[in-house]
Amino acid sequence: MTTVTEHDAAATDAVSRAVEALAGRRIAVLTGAGVSTDSGIPDYRGKGAPVRTPMTVEQFLSSEAARRRYWVGSHLGWRAFAASEPNGGHLALADLEQSGIATGVITQNVDGLHLRAGSRRVVELHGTMRRVFCTHCGQVFDRRDLAQRVEADNPWILVPENVALGPDGDVLPETSEDFVVPVCTVCGGMLKPDVVFFGEYIPAEKFREAEQLVHTSEGLVIAGSSLVVNSGIRLLERARRRRLPVVIVNRGLTRADARATVKVEGGTSEVLRALADALPSAR
């Protein structure tokens, strides 16, 4: 049996090897849901994560009942979601960018915590919960303004103190009956959060932006992602083709552990802070 001490020693050794592999290089960072767990936002696939069946884009677009159910849960969850604060991992990545080491962050998360932590160049692969847009006329709305409208139209809706929050800021509502679904105030069209739903493709221009960030870097750090989503694997392969060092930081296995230069088994907040403290500034 491996003891806690042995785990700590292995992680410390792996961090040292990661620092050696990345030293003197400008690095791109890809983050997944595991980076936000210390902010109280759960992972889809981490140990102990509940089994979820997220709504697909087809269900959302084709069913009024599905949209009603989505908006109830999305509103309840968003209030708790928006109250989350950046954690040590987010702050460490902002520091790496500030010191000239990180070229930017590519994130699979929609929580906006990297921007709130101070990272300036953030590619939000799967969109953001900060905005909502009309699928008919394209008008964009701030989520905070929409939340006020939702509560004005549905005064009975109460935000519980402890909701079963999902990684996308959603919860499973007890009921959606009688809920008034928000519509575009410009044309009356259907509103959709500016996020990539399950079954929906990442916008091509967004993925090209992520590719460009990797292309202009000399190393890649992947933190808090199991790399189940193919976009992450594609970016990893872009780095490998250029023979760049790839460091993976994650609790548990990922799809690409065997392809990493260094795999660090550990919490992202602690490991990213260790990297930020150890890597020499590029400024």
Image: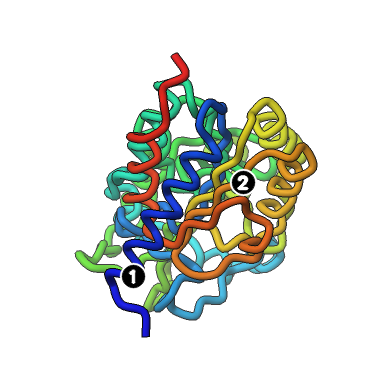
User: Which residue is at the far left?
Assistant: 161
Q: Name the residue type under label 2.
A: Val
Disc 2: which residue: 246
C-alpha span from label 1 to label 2: 24 Å
Question: Which callout, 1 or 2, points to the residue nearer the camera?
Answer: 1
Q: Is residue 253 left or right of residue 165?
A: right
Q: Is residue 230 left or right of residue 14?
A: right
Q: Name the residue type under label 1.
A: Glu
Q: Is residue 109 above or below residue 176?
A: above
User: Which residue is at the far top?
Assistant: 283
Q: Secondary structure at mark 2?
A: strand
Is the residue marked by circle 1 packed among few (<14), some (14-19), or many (20+) residues within 10 Å? few
Which dot marks residue 6? 1
Q: Is residue 160 left or right of residue 133?
A: left
Q: Quadrant of the C terminus?
A: top left
Task: State the image coordinates of residue 84 (x, y, percent, origin top left).
Answer: 29, 49
Q: Residue at x 71, y 58 (%)?
A: 230
Q: Residue at x 40, y 40 (%)?
A: 275
Q: Residue at x 60, y 40 (%)?
A: 220
Q: Residue at x 69, y 31 (%)?
A: 209
Task: State the image coordinates of residue 252 (x, y, percent, origin top left).
Answer: 48, 69
Which dot marks residue 108? none
Task: State the image coordinates of residue 142 (x, y, percent, origin top left).
Answer: 45, 36
Q: Secondary structure at mark 1?
A: helix
Is 50 in front, or is 128?
A: 50
Task: State the image coordinates of residue 2 (x, y, percent, origin top left).
Answer: 36, 79
Answer yes or no: is residue 117 visible.
yes
